[in-house]
Image (cartoon, coloured by chain):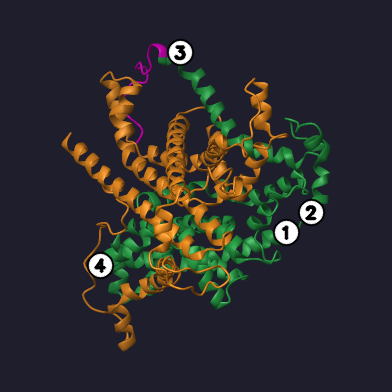
Chain colours: A orange, B green
Amino acid sequence: MATSTLEAPRSTPRAAPPKRPRGSGAVGRFIERNGAYLFLFPAIVYLAIFTVFPLIRGLMLSFTATKLVNPAGGKPVGVENYEYLLSSDKFWTSVVTTLLYTLFTVVFSVGIGTAGALLLNTAFKGRGIIRAIATIPWAVPTVAAALIFVWIYNNEQGILNRTTSALGMGQHGWLVDPQYGLFAVTLATVWKLTPLVMLVMLSALQSVPQELREATWVDGATRFQSFLAVTLPHLMPTLRVITLLMTIWSIRRFEIIFLITGGGPLDVTNTLVVNVYRTAFQDQNLGRAAAIGALGLVLSLLVTVVYFIVEQIQERQESQR
Amino acid sequence: MTTTLIPTDLPRRRGVAAKFGSFGKAVLITLLVVFAGFPVYWMLGTSLGTESSLYGGSQPLIPEFQNIGQWGGFLSDIPIFRWLGNSFVIAAGTTILSLVLATMAAYALSRYRFHGRGVAGFIFFSTQMLPEALIIVPLYAIFAGAGLLNSHWGLVLADTAFVMPVAMFIIKSGIDKIPYEIEESARIDGCSRLRILTTIVLPLIMPSIAAAAVIAFFDGWNEFMFANTFISSSDLWPASVGLSSFLGQFYTPMNVVMFCALLFALPAIIFFLWAQRGIVSGLTAGSVKG
């Protein structure tokens, strides 16, 4: 499947390179000959300065005992930060929390988003308006969304507690009871992100070949059977990619968790990136924060590798069918 | 393409499915709309509530539109317009810088074959994987040395680093779709690459550029982590940081906060509804299909 690979360079229709450089003079010829690099140069240099260099600096920091008061550098301590983290319960809790948060967020947002897209793709009255309402949360700025949910979760005046007590399920400390912390941040995240999945899946649905579906109806298939035979295979590549992106984005998601629970109550929502931020700017320990960040990156990479392996296996199975 | 020769009276739904059909669908659609719409509706309702209706009793389920006059008074309590102005400057700067860098890079990756093309593409993609939290610590150290803390410039530079690669993929997929033959005749006439890019390619990829612009603007408008860390002066805060400063403070009434949140969200929502079609095609073409 051509659409399932994320890597930029793909075979695109392309004519042969121009036969003769067309520039005027030496400068023009230089530009013509090295066009690709000149066009690419600014962006690559930019990424080198603001992404690659800080990344390397961050890795170097992780081997030092740098404090926030003197961010320029602390004394080198070798792998001490890593040793500390790998033997600390708080760190491993953080890893588990990240994985749980990612799992729940991805499952619910991809599940609801895909189901919603299938629903909104059918014909009904007022579809345009309903589609707009269903996708609005994606446009709501994260900080605004966080404030709304903090108010919804409020102990005394929150609408969630009013609803649960009206339904006879009692009142709960959504933001103060460790039991509900992960639920609270996951619900808010799913609300914010499901529309994105829905938008992407809606657009994938638009390219499902209707002729094929109708052909299966002629052959006597039910809607559900033609969905399984035609629509679902057609959606799979997009579904896989959006799942991967949602996973990677969930591992690095910070704002909504930080703003709603700040990593609490009792660290139950202290995901790796929240942990990095708190270690750096609250505990003021930049060296250790950098080490947490580096281990977080390892986790992202692992997930990506697993994804690509799964994708390879699935594609092989699909091509054998 | 949708016209076919199939007779329309074919049985398409049978048995239980048919009975469930329209009613079940209506229920599901209602659930979806309530799930997505309720928090926004609640934000509006809170902003129209009075202190006694919010804290004394409980927030009414129907927004109290008769209180709309209180909105004017809220504006004098909080410098929300200054913060929104700061957000706008940061978002606009991020958009312009991202588009310039991304368009040139996208053209190179789409139209040239050269050594290191795969590596370059991978560098762009891998930024998707990088947690900002890993970068923020060294970036803070670098910015502190370069005098870029407490500056909108610093934020534009940091935000661009994360959204520019996304913009690049969106624009690249736009360029990929244009047949090369269109450029070829211009090459034969002796046009330089830069002129081809600006006069021939750019007008053709406007939808992709627009989609990338919306994504970049959203990113700059919403960004919180860098802004919260790099900007300490409240005059320079973007709205995201300004609003977050109310969290955990009990003396600011929720109706005022929600009114400010509404002012912050509304431009983004309107912009999104207006540009939705472009965003969707750009997103799917760019970040999803790469």
Q: Let me know if residue A13 appears in the view.
A: yes
Q: Residue at 65% of width from left, 42% of height from top?
A: A150
Could you tell me which residue is drawn at 82 percent across and 45 percent down? Answer: B70
Residue B14 lies in the magenta-colored region: yes
State the residue position of label 2: B75
The residues tagged by marks 3 and 2 sit, at their Cα atoms, a distance apart of 53 Å
- Do callouts 3 and 2 mark residues in contact (Cβ within 8 Å)? no
Does residue B76 appear to the left or right of A171 in the view shown?
Answer: right
Q: Which residue is mark 1?
A: B81
> Are circles 1 and 2 on residues that touch, CB within 8 Å?
yes
Instruction: Determine if the magenta segment contains residue B52.
Output: no
The quadrant of the image that shows the N terminus of chain A is top left
- Which disc, if any, is residue B113? 4
- The residue at the point 54 percent across, 22 percent down is B27
Q: Chain of mark 4?
A: B
* Mark 3, residue position: B19
Discs 1, 2: same chain: yes
- What secondary structure characterizes most of the magenta part? loop
For the residues marked 1 and 4, what is the alpha-carbon distance in whole angstroms?
48 Å
Q: CA distance from mark 1 to mark 3?
A: 53 Å
> Which amino acid type corresponds to the residue marked 2 in the rendered image?
Leu
In the shown orientation, is residue B162 left or right of residue A304?
right
Nearer the N terminus, badge 3 or badge 2? 3
**Magenta extent:** B1-16
Q: Quadrant of the C terminus of chain A?
A: top left
Indicate which label's residue lies in the foreground, 1 or 4: 1
Which of pointers 1 and 3 indicates the residue nearer the eye? 1
Q: Earlier in the sequence, mark 4 or mark 3?
A: 3
Q: Earlier in the sequence, mark 1 or mark 2?
A: 2
